[in-house]
Image: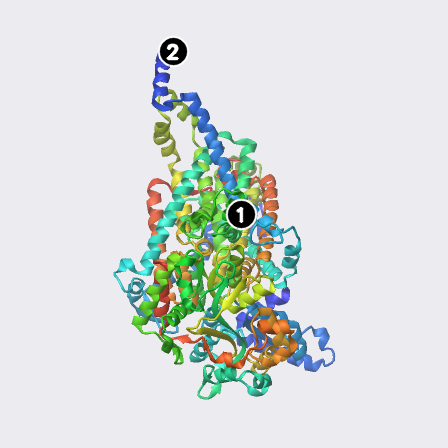
Amino acid sequence: MSTEHTSGKRGQLIRAFSSTRRRLGLTVGPSLVWLLLLLLAPLTFMVAVSFLQVNDAYQIIYQPTLANYGNLFAGPGPFWESSFFKSLVLSYELAFVTTVVCLVLAFPLAYLLARRGGRTFKFVIFLVLLPFFTMYLVRAYSWFLMFGSNGVINSTLVTLGVVSGPVHLFDFGKFAIVVGLTHAYFPYMLLSLYASLDGLDFSLVEAARDLGASRTETLRDIIVPLVLPGIISGSLFVFVPSLGAFITPRFLGQGKVLMIGQLIEQRIDSLYAINYGGAASMFIVVSIVVAFALAFRYVSIEDLGGF
Amino acid sequence: MAADHTDERSKRGGTDRRTFLKAAGATGAAGLAGVAGCLGGGGKQTINIYTWEEYANFKDQIENTLDIKLEITKGTSSAKMFSAFNSGQDAQYDIVIPNNNYIPKLLDADLIAPVKKDAVPNFGSLYGKFKEFANSQFAKGGTMYGIPIRFGWYGISYDTRAIPNPKHSYSELWNKDHKGNIVQYDNHFKAISATALYLGYTDAFKGDRVSLTDEQLKKCKQKLIDEKPLLEGYIAADPTYIKSFEQGNHTIGFSGRNEIVEMWSNGDDWVDYYVPEEGSLAWFEGAAVSKKSDNKELAWKVVNEYISPKIGAALAKAGYSPSCNPKTQQNLSKDENKLYGAIEPSRLDGFIPFKAIENEKKWVSAWEEVKTA
Amino acid sequence: MATETNTDATSAKTRTGGLLGVERTDALLRYGLYAVAGGLLVFLWIPLLVMVALSFMVNTSTLFPFKGVTLANYVATFADASLMRALLHSIEIATIAALIATVLGVLASFALARYDFPYKELYRTLGILPMVIPGVIMGIALLIYFRSLLSVTPGFWTVVVTHSVYGFPFVLLLVTARLYTFDRSLEEAARDLGADPLTTFRDVTFPILAPAIGAGFLFAWIRSFEDFIRAFFVKGTMNVLTTSMFSMIKYGTAPKMNAISSFIVFVIAVALVVAMNVGNVTEYVAGTEADE
């Protein structure tokens, strides 16, 4: 009714977008085009490249081949002894351990925050978010200073007399990497869990306790099922980036640990071996797709909101 | 800052836009002779260099001497420099200065232009050995394509307080006494080459390229895998190595000499360095001019500046590595000369220069296997 | 009734409390939770605090032996022209990329929150994807795409474009969340009072949405500013702050690294405090409804 009275350009504009289809076009259109061109197309191209041949100067020859995938597993021994396979397995291991550690550590904090709320909550969230917003590079670097046979951790322990010599655990290596990754992706898990726990009706918990359930039973039968979406989405947001981690293992592995992200980067950087890089990346992409698919069995995509 | 943007965009446009801008600029300068200063560099030619960090320290001096504009992009690895050139970025640069083993690679990929000897008079002052290298490793069909700038060599550095009397051999890197305190170089070329020299495969280094047989490569790989449990870690970057040393994270490692010279300059007198008796790898920087450069003559003039006695000396000081021009001694103090000044030419004979690798893919794979062992 | 509860309580005690009894265990658990929470915060903060401390020290690699306090590291850092140039690049790229991401994201949020269309879930997944893909994959895919397929030389604009894609999901999630809790009757009321759609948007919808849009922009901006791995691949030979810092570790001095890193922590702390108090960021971040 009001549009009929509006005249001129403004009215034309309003009338032009009065149909739902037009509005959809305006809202979805630009981002769809943008994402198709700059996300889907590159990924598709990379998939394509992994199936194409490449000459010695690493220029693409448009001839299909499965050789790139075969070459990934090439090596003196069977395929499970190839460096690619070992690196892939190691990456899965470290990503999985990081996810579990994040879950175990974040759950108590998220639970507390959900129950308390208020100003404490705001302050704690600030303290949690701030490291998260500092550059990833900065955080990885700060851990780099801490570890090492004579890094800050070890030298402090030795100076304080707690230990007699440097503790091997605090040297660079897998443990350091897990710590670094946990530190980096912890906020994702915390916020996911918190978002879920926040919607939890705690009177259910109290009811269960009143009815005689033990704490573990309450946890297992009441809390966890209700928080499952948060656990799943949090795990997804920790596992996937950890799998492809590059900076953290580079700084905290001191060259002794080679995760799949580093392997791919090395090949691309020193040789521009895009066939190898493409094929190797496919494994990570497929892992991500599978992880998502598994996650969606338990959680609808709407629940993935709020980080 | 806005000027940076324009340069970025014009670089992306490729040669055409750059040529156009230069033509426009040159016309403008000619037309307004005497008011050139007010144009703020519109008439000056720009030379783009892709090189190491310290080279940027002399930007102003060279700009003033040659009356040009210099755009310096700092790189951190020769491999990256090569891969950039190999993928189209050779159109963006006039000069690239990787390590010597990458010049033949650039040459084979037909990316660089021959040296204009008249523009590089300082070449005549270089050590005989480096002139030889320029005529062999940097040459094809009798034509020279690169100019050596600075050099350095690799060896074993150690903490004299922890290891007072090491054997001057690579074997110390496999010495169980130093378990947990050894650092190996984090690079396939250097680590495998060092192991090859340790195992006595000196013949592999005799040709144009380093070539290990599959059997030899396998043995090197196994040796490196055996070394892994003894290591504190693998380090390639200079500052990381120095930090690790100063922190006490390791007591012995395979490193370049310039890190140690830097530590000596910083007052760390407890660190020392030896050249292994099995042979030492030496690097030298090679300046090459892109085939796609529009200012090849001017580019070579810039290169000439970097090996001039004055700037060459300052460059040596900045990077803790001696210049390939012995005349730089004149501009360094006695102490400085000991660290990065002249060197007895006969010593150069013992060095094995970096070379391109025959079948590098196999080395990269072997290295990956060491890392994932 | 009371008897039954008592019996239950007793059996609960024997089942769970074991040796300690329900109340004691409750208390222990509660303090335990606090302890874990406290420990976690320490864990999150210690390395950063150490780094900030080292940035002010003469001895830049270790805390002991303590050699003294100095501002020289900061002076050297800010005098480094190329580092400052890289910082400027980062700021410019982040701003442009975040703007693109915000415009696209706000539009898309409306679609997701208010309309139904075929393949909606697929579109939503696509929208979230850039946030979840590991940086290495995204960086390499885009590098190959730009270099080998489109023959575009990587540089300033490739980074802008990459980051705009990377920042998009953050805007999308935040604005959609806000739109879900948006009271549409407000818009209806405006319409009933005679306002046309444009006026309604300008005077009713947008002001309510503004904090969420602002938060989305901020998040996208920060993600772009702090990103290393994607920029690393698609930046060509230009430098952004993160890549400069990375090469400082490889080929520079640690003191500058500590100083610039600490500076960044400080700036972001200030920005975050402002955002949290002005923009009600906490609610959107945690996905809860704002108190309206």
Q: Where is residue C9 in the image (x, y as percent from the top left)?
A: 37, 17
User: Which chain does the residue under circle 1 lie in?
Assistant: A
- Identify the residue at image location x=42%, y=64%: B172
Q: In which quarter of the image is residue C28?
A: top left
Residue B335 in the figure: left or right of residue C29? right
Query: In this figure, which colouring scheme has been used for the structure?
Result: rainbow
Furthest toward the front, the residue is B165
Amino acid type at circle 1 is: Phe
Return the x and y of residue B130 as percentages of the image width and height: 51, 82
Which residue is at the front of the view, B158 or A205? B158
Disc ID at residue B83: none
- Mark 2: few/some/many CA within 10 Å (<14, 14-19, 20+): few
Residue tagged 1: A133
Chain letter behind tag 2: C
**Position of residue C211 in the picture relative to residue C108 (left or right):** right
Residue C241 position within the rendered picture, expressed as x and y whole percent measured from the top left: 56, 58
Residue B224 in view in this figure: yes
Please tell me whether residue B279 is drawn above or below residue A166 in the rendered image: below
Residue A255's place in the image compared with B361, above or below, is above
Amino acid carrying label 2: it is Ala
User: Is residue A233 among what the camera can see?
Assistant: no
Q: Which residue is drawn at 68% across and 82% down?
A: B30
In-image side of B139 versus A232 (left or right) = right
Instruction: Name the residue that disc number 2 marks.
Output: C2
Residue A67 drawn above or below residue C126: below
- The answer to whether dots 1 and 2 both sit on one chain is no
For label 1, the crowd category at 10 Å Cα-Cα, with few meaning under 14, some 14 to 19 and many 20 or more, is: many
Q: Say which of C189 and B219 sits in front.
A: B219
Q: Is residue B254 above or below residue A203?
A: below
SS for callout 1: helix
For marks 1 and 2, give the CA distance. 53 Å
Question: In which image quadrant can residue A233 be found?
Answer: top left
